[in-house]
Image (spheres, rainbow, N blue to C red):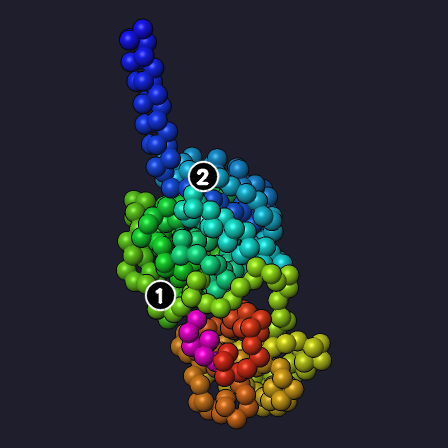
C-alpha cells in the first residue's frame, strides 16, 4: 500500500514537472495573411508563382524547429498577395492582435505577410497595437517551393524574436534576411533581392546569428501603447490619397482626389518635399477647404523639413519628417480619427 502511494506521488510529481517544462516555453501565436512566404511556383527554379497558396498550418509544419523555441498556435486571417492589402484587413489584424495580447498567457505574435506592403502594415500596427509584448512581421522574397527559399529561416528567426524577452517594448519589428528592423524606418529597397528590407536613415535594430538576436539599438519614436490611436471600435479609416510630383507634372490626380471627397492628401514631393506649381495650387486650395495636406518626398533618405522652401504654417501644410509617402499616409489616416487640427497632427508627425 505504501509502495503504491509512493509510486502514485512519484507519477504525479513527474507529471507536474513535465507539464511545467512544457509550459515554460513562451506562447507565440502566428497569424498568416498570405504573400510570397506562402507562395507556390511551378518549379524550384522559376520566378513565376501564386502568392498566398500555403496555409498557416503548412507553414508551421515546414519549420518544425520553431516548436523548440515556443509553444506555437497558428491562425489564418486572409490569403492575399500584399499588393491587395487594405484598410479592412489592417483593422481586423490590429483588433485580433490586441485581443490575443490581452491574454496573459500569450507572450508574442508573428505575422506572415507579403513584402509589397509589409512596411505599411508594420507601421500601421506600430501605431495601433496596445501592448509592449513582441509583435514581429515576417515575409519572404522567394516562394515556398523555390530552391533556397528564404521563408523558413525568416519564420524561424521571427519566432525566436517573438519569444525573446529582450524584444518587449521595442514596437513592432520586421525580420528579414537575419536582420531586425523597426516598423517606422523599414522600407523595401529592391524589387526581388532577399536583402531588400533596410532602414536607410537609421539602420537596423539588431542582427540574428545562430537563432540568437543581438540588439544594437532601440527606436526613439513613440509607438504602440504610447500613441492615442485606438481602432477597437472603428470599421473604416479616413480616405487619404498620395499625389506624385515630377517634372511637368499634371494636377489631374490631385484634383481627382479632392473631387472624390478624400479627407487628406500626401504629396510625394521632389527634393525636400517640394511641389510642382500646378499641384501646389490644387493642394493649397484643398487645405483651405479643410482637407489635410502632408508634404513628404519621393527621395528615399533624409527628412522633409518644416517651413523650408515652403511656408507650411501659411498654407496649413504638415511636414512628414523622415516618413516616406506611404507611411505618412498611414499616420495621417490615423491622426484624422482623432483630430483635424494641422498643428496637432504636425506634433504627432514629430512624435510617432
**Residue nearer the viewer, 22 or 41:** 22
Screen quadrant of the N terminus? top left
Alpha carbon distance from label 1 to label 2: 28 Å
Residue 327 horizontal/vertical position (percent): 50, 69
Q: Is residue 204 above or below residue 344?
A: above
Q: Residue at x 31, y 53 (%)?
A: 166
Q: Report the magenta residues as a range.
A: 346-352
Per the image, label 2 sits on a secondary structure element best described as strand
Asked whether 134 falls inside the magenta stretch, the response is no
Q: Which residue, as the protein is rendered here, is positioned at the far top? A: 1
Asked whether 350 falls inside the magenta stretch, the response is yes
Q: Residue at x 66, y 76 (%)?
A: 262
The residue identified by callout 1 is: 219
The residue identified by callout 2 is: 72
Residue 157 horizontal/vertical position (percent): 38, 47
Horizontal side of 52 relative to 9 (left or right) equals right
Per the image, label 1 sits on a secondary structure element best described as loop
Amino acid at each position: 500500500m505504501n509502495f503504491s502511494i509512493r509510486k502514485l506521488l512519484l507519477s504525479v510529481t513527474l507529471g507536474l514537472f513535465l507539464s511545467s517544462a512544457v509550459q515554460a516555453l513562451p506562447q507565440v501565436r502566428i497569424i498568416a495573411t498570405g504573400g510570397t512566404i506562402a507562395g507556390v511556383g511551378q518549379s524550384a527554379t522559376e520566378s513565376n508563382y501564386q502568392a498566398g497558396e500555403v496555409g498557416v498550418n503548412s507553414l508551421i509544419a515546414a519549420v518544425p524547429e520553431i516548436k523548440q523555441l515556443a509553444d506555437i498556435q497558428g491562425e489564418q486571417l486572409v490569403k492575399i498577395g500584399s499588393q491587395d492589402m487594405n484598410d479592412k484587413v489592417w483593422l481586423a489584424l490590429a483588433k485580433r492582435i490586441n485581443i490575443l495580447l490581452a491574454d496573459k498567457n500569450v507572450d508574442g505574435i508573428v505575422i506572415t505577410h507579403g513584402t509589397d506592403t509589409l512596411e505599411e502594415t508594420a507601421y500601421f500596427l506600430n501605431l495601433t497595437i496596445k501592448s509592449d509584448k513582441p509583435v514581429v512581421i515576417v515575409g519572404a522574397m522567394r516562394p515556398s517551393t523555390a530552391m533556397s527559399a528564404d521563408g523558413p529561416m525568416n519564420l524561424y528567426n521571427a519566432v525566436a524574436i517573438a519569444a525573446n524577452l529582450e524584444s518587449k517594448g521595442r514596437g513592432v519589428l520586421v525580420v528579414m534576411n537575419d536582420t531586425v528592423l523597426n516598423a517606422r524606418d523599414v522600407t523595401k529597397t529592391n524589387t526581388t533581392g532577399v536583402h531588400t528590407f533596410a532602414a536607410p536613415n537609421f539602420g537596423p535594430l539588431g542582427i540574428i546569428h545562430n537563432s540568437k538576436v543581438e540588439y544594437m539599438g532601440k527606436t526613439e519614436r513613440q509607438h504602440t501603447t504610447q500613441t492615442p490611436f485606438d481602432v477597437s471600435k472603428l470599421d473604416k479609416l479616413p480616405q487619404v490619397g498620395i499625389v506624385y510630383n515630377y517634372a511637368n507634372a499634371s494636377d489631374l490626380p490631385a484634383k481627382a482626389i479632392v473631387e472624390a471627397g478624400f479627407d487628406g492628401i500626401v504629396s510625394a514631393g521632389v527634393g525636400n518635399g517640394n511641389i510642382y506649381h500646378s499641384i501646389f495650387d490644387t493642394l493649397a486650395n484643398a487645405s483651405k477647404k479643410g482637407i489635410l495636406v502632408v508634404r513628404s518626398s519621393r527621395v528615399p533618405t533624409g527628412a522633409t523639413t518644416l517651413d523650408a522652401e515652403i511656408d507650411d504654417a501659411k498654407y496649413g501644410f504638415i511636414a512628414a519628417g523622415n516618413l516616406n509617402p506611404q507611411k505618412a499616409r498611414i499616420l495621417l489616416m490615423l491622426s484624422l480619427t482623432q483630430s483635424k487640427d494641422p498643428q496637432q497632427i504636425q506634433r504627432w508627425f514629430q512624435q510617432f
